């Protein structure tokens, strides 16, 4: 499957691209700077230059599925969170629809189901993520929404807790989030569901059954 990965230069996106490639898919890494191309080209991965703050509709040509893992990051202010995490995601959903792409997977965040309860420093972030999730849900696209807990940089364990229930807060390695994203694409059975994701005991290949 040809999969557009938005945020491919990011810590999760980068690993998701590699895992998709390993599983026999054709990831297309959406990046915004030419000097980010090298690492992907060295691994035989196609790149497309596009920026969520400009017209990025060209990135959706000949694509079967989209994985959105972009984010403005913790060091930017609330305005960028709205521009990237909310409006960027919403525009990506629109482009996917226009291009006839069936399945859209987004990396959201745990806590998004109840933004009002969030700490005041991240309330805007939770609202932005929620707006994007709600827009995707109402879009008519097949969707998978992954809401990870606190991201960690240690190596993945290959085992997670992926549930639709009321979320239990916890940590999760970025590598395991990337593996879950690749597994979502690999199973190719979008069920229009929202999943909470933290570390756990279930092998990733046994999830989504
Ligand atoms: N931190 C947490 O504990 C936590 C928990 C749950 C969910 N999340 C969410 O998980 C997602 C992925 O996390 P991560 O750690 O992989 O993030 P990351 O390393 O910061 O990656 C985010 C990516 O988004 C890209 N991006 C930003 N602005 C862009 C633009 N205008 N156009 C195109 N791409 C743009 C960045 O591009 P550049 O590389 O060019 O800067 C970067 O590659 C984020 O949405 C984050 O909000 C985080």
Image (tube, helix red, strand yellow):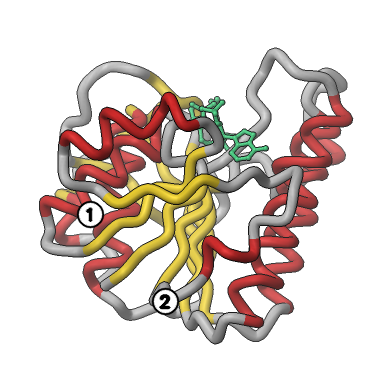
Image spot of residue 109 (x, y percent): 59, 41
Image spot of residue 105 (x, y percent): 48, 62
**Image height of 179 relative to 58, above or below:** above
What is the quadrant of the N terminus in the image?
A: bottom left
**Residue drawn at x 33%, y 28% as measured from the top left:** 173
For label 1, the residue is 20
Q: Which quarter of the rendered image does ligand 1 occupy? A: top right
**Residue drawn at x 24%, y 48% as measured from the top left:** 45
**Image height of 149 relative to 145, above or below:** above
Image spot of residue 185 (x, y percent): 31, 66
Of 15 and 42, which appears nearest the observer? 42
Image mark for residue 62: 2
Label 2 environment density (alpha carbons within 10 Å; few <14, some 14–19, many ≥20): few
Query: Horizontal placement of 204 versus 27: left or right?
Result: left
**Image height of 97 relative to 58, above or below:** below
Contact between marks 1 and 2 (CB within 8 A): the answer is no
Identify the element where label 2 is drawn.
loop
Q: Is the residue at mark 2 in contact range of ligand 1, meaning its CB lies under 8 Å from it? A: no
């Amino acid at each position: 499957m040809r999969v557009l990965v938005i945020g491919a230069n990011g810590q999760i996106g980068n690993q998701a691209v590699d895992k998709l490639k390993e599983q026999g898919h054709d990831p297309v890494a959406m990046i915004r700077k030419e000097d980010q191309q090298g690492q992907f080209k060295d691994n035989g991965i196609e790149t497309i230059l596009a920026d969520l703050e400009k017209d990025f509709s060209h990135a959706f040509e000949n694509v079967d599925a989209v994985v959105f893992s972009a984010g403005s990051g913790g060091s930017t202010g609330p305005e960028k969170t709205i521009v990237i995490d909310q409006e960027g995601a919403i525009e990506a959903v629109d482009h996917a629809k226009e291009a006839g792409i069936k399945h859209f997977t987004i990396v959201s965040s745990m806590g998004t189901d109840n933004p009002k309860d969030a700490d005041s420093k991240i309330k805007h972030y939770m609202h932005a993520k929620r707006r994007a999730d709600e827009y995707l849900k109402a879009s008519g696209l097949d969707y998978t929404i992954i809401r990870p807990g606190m991201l960690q940089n240690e190596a993945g364990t290959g085992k997670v807790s992926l549930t639709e229930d009321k979320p239990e807060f916890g940590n999760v390695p970025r590598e395991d989030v990337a593996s879950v994203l690749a597994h979502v694409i690999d199973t190719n059975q979008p069920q229009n569901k929202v999943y909470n994701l933290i570390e756990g005991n279930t092998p990733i290949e046994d999830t989504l059954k």
